[in-house]
Amino acid sequence: MSSVQNIQEGRSRPSFPFGFLRRATPGAGSPAILALLMTPGIIIVAAFFLIPLALVAMRVADGPDGWATYFVILTNGRYFASLVQTLLMSAGVTLTALILCGVCGLFLVRNRFAGRNMLMALLTLPLSFPGTVVGFMVIMLAGRQGVIGSVTDALFDEKLVFAYEISGLFIGYLYFSIPRVILAVMASAEKLDPQLEEAARSLGAPTWRVIKDVILPGLMPGLVSSGAICFATAMGAFGTAFTLATDIDVLPMVIYTEFTRNANVAVAAALSIALGAMTWAVLFAVRCFVGSSADTAARGGA
Amino acid sequence: MRRDWKFYSQLGLTVLLCLFIVIPVGMSALAGVTVNVFKGLSSGLTLRWIIEVWDLYASSIMLSLWIALVCLAVTLVAGVPLAYVLVRRPGRLTRLFEELLTLPVAIPGLALALALLITYGGVSGYRSSWLFILTGHVLFTLPFMVRSVAAVMSAMDMKMLEEGAASLGAGFWRRFFTVIVPNAKPGILAGALMVVTLSIGEFNLTWMLHTPLTKTLPVGLADAYASMRLEIGSAYTLIFFILIMPLLIAMQALADRGKRASKRIDTAEDTL
Amino acid sequence: MSTQIRLRDCAKTFGDGTRALAPFDLTIEGGETIVLLGPSGCGKTTILRMIAGLEFPDKGGVITFDGDDVTHQSIEKRRVGMVFQSYALFPNMTVAQNVAYGLKVHGVSREESDARVKDMLEMMHIEMLADRRIDQLSGGQRQRVALARAIAVQPRVLLLDEPLTALDAKLRVRLRTEINALLRKLGITAVYVTHDQEEAMALGDRIVVMQKGEIAQIGTPREIYRKPQNPFVADFVGAANRLDGQMRDGRLHIGTHVFDAVDAFDPRHGAIIDQGPVELFFRADGLSTCDAARAHVTGRVEAVSYLGERLRLTVSGIGAQAVIVDTHADDVIAPGADVHCQINPDRLTVFPVGAGAGNSAANQSAHAVS
């Protein structure tokens, strides 16, 4: 008998590493069954996502510059300025949310005190608020009848009102992001191995070193993936801006105006594709960076 | 742990953040039952605004609930089997499909709505019905259902359970409905709550897809914010809170139960 | 009543071209318990899964149950009972519902099913657990439920895939004894996969030792233990000590010593080894300590472990690798001391050099028995 090379434990290897739907796996459904199971999903994705997306991509060519319309976001000064503004604001919101929630999330996981559960519940309250409601919350805070206005009015005799401009939008996206980032931070913080920290302390590391070498790396996946959600949402969301004012010049509002008011379908399509591609790229890069999956888990539509 | 200034400053920040979240919610809830917001609480409390909102927007609210339920049904039928295939037959093709499936979440709703309008805007009977909005909602929520179910399925060693059932003589469909689906229940439940919540609150897509005859709850909200007095907007928001709150609480409870269940493993003594 | 299983010309190549099993024939008699024994990756589980219908043999392979060709039958149709290493119990059902599942699938009436479930639970001594949820059970209890569930459908063959591996040592021995009694009582054909040779010895009517996708030896526990047919089997079933020697005119030379009565039959060639270099495999009882005058070999103690009823020495300088020698528990020996040993030639298994590589992966379990 010739000796057999490359033996592997039968149980631990997938039976059919290449073929999907190629041969029946005993124990799983037959190829026909698997295909049947996927059919509804495939139809939905194909008919209502792939085909429309392809049509939009084609539609861009109807624009003033033909296929070059794709680059209108870079060549047109107004669109480009709007892109820059949107990017800056999204990055700002992301950073602010990460810092605030990083501190508070860690604090909530590591301390036990009366009222802790209530604080946690309240912080995650806006998790499923749509963008319009978030916009309304901003109006409640910083609008003409808002808290901040009343307080500043009482203190300095001057109403501070900033809901209806880009800083209002910033507040709105922060409002939207806080529950998501807090949840992600707390999930990662709970998984931190306290022994690691104890080990670092036993080796004489001062607090800031422990934070830098042990805690931050442990929180990183949660921070990165929830940060990506914040960023993507701030880039693409529309409801909050729509509620606050129709003339805030962020990219989604520009697209909306081009499409509805100017009936400029090709440009709107080109801008949408650019926006979609950028958002997707950020999420994809993050997923490659942290491995998997938290991204859809925390997103809802502002 | 000793409570020093560090503890109290962090507590302070957390409370501040909490106030930031809660104050507007409380204010809008209060405004919804106040006779006149400009005069403040002293003008008295009333249910007038709530009733007025109900008269004006009851159909939008009902439509939203209806769409959310149908959306749930569609995502269940399409999403649960899909999650099964993705988990059970991992491969390059399924990876690709999974990526494709999550794209509608990554791409801004506005872009998606634009694509749907360009493609199906001309189909008049469809364009003007609630089914058009449903389409958008299904696209947007399906990935959440699939992810939620797939997460539970990949944690439960489905292959072995199926082999166990098959060795006892159970064919595929029996295995699917008596073993796979019941054991994926936590994921299905979480996914369902997510889908309903998201569908009820969806605005980005819906605003573009709706017609004057197919307004949903958030569309009505935007409408109320833009054109009605503050009290009406607040009262409408209050109704939304009341609708969404049980869903949120249920989701939280489900997550807590999952956490507790995972801690219970291996508490049984090996007395036999 | 019990089913004879035959595998003919069965081989298994996985989709990516790796060969898990070389073609082999195996007949399992009705009512027999056969144990597939080998290190991980040897293909034992693949054989079990082939019998179950979870893997299909490459083209040309035939599997029959009592003469019926079941080669292309899927697992649902084969009526096998299967017990998995990680139990595969359905968490959404109670203990009783788990046991009743197969009966329900087979359309057994409610009353009959209830009665059968009750019998099964009693047989496994878990009747008080009937309404428990699976996650409220210990590992040992779970495996009892899994056994009850597999037996309840009165399968043609019971397949056990390392059922005790996930349990702790003490429980393993106890359940092993029970499984043994159960298999004898039921008289059912059973195939049992394990990497633990002690388990194999205790349970098997016959043992199939596997190595790298091939059958290394089939035999009763006694044959496997006393007459391993190649160095791999010898090593795997516990004869881990190895010395070099020479055969000259039918007599064994080790160093300057010559031994007469040595069983130097080479089963591979079916002949007595008369001449040439040989490898000697033996357990700890192949050497015994003695005084310097009567010593055949002398080595240096590297490590001493106290095993209660005896003292186990790891000795270097005798063979190419350290050898294990047992001595009286009361002896006082410290590492670094010289130790003199006698060779017990009737405890040696002799192989011509190059009969097959002893697998070092087997060493870990090789010390378990001696």
Image (cartoon, coloured by chain):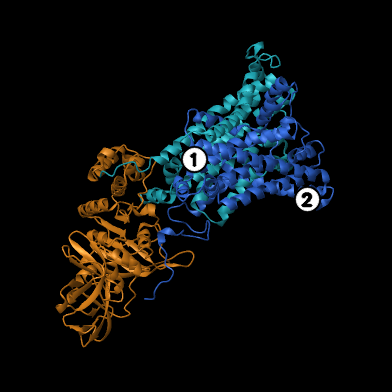
Chain colours: A blue, B cyan, C orange
Q: Quadrant of residue C354?
A: bottom left
* Left or right of B208 on screen, residue A219: left
Q: Nearer the viewer, residue C355 or B1?
A: B1
Q: Nearer the viewer, residue C174 or C286?
A: C286
Whether residue B78 sits left or right of residue C296 in the image: it is right
- Residue shown at the point (33%, 76%) measured from the top left: C356
Task: Indicate whether A140 appears above or below C334.
Answer: above
Type of amino acid under label 1: Gly
Quickly name the residue at label 2: A70
Left or right? Give the position of C31 relative to B218.
left
Q: Nearer the viewer, residue A215 or B38?
A: A215
Image-quadrant location for residue B126: top right
| Residue C85 seen from this side | yes
**Residue C281, image x, y percentages:** 25, 74
Kindly give the residue lying farthest to the top in the view shown. B43
Per the image, the residue denoted by label 1 is B187
Quadrant that contains the C terminus of chain B: top left
Q: Quadrant of residue B46?
A: top right
Residue B221 visible, this angle: no
Secondary structure of the residue carrying tag 1 is: helix
Mark 1, residues whose alpha carbon is within 10 Å: few (<14), some, or many (≥20)? Answer: many
Image coords of residue C331 (percent x, y): 17, 65
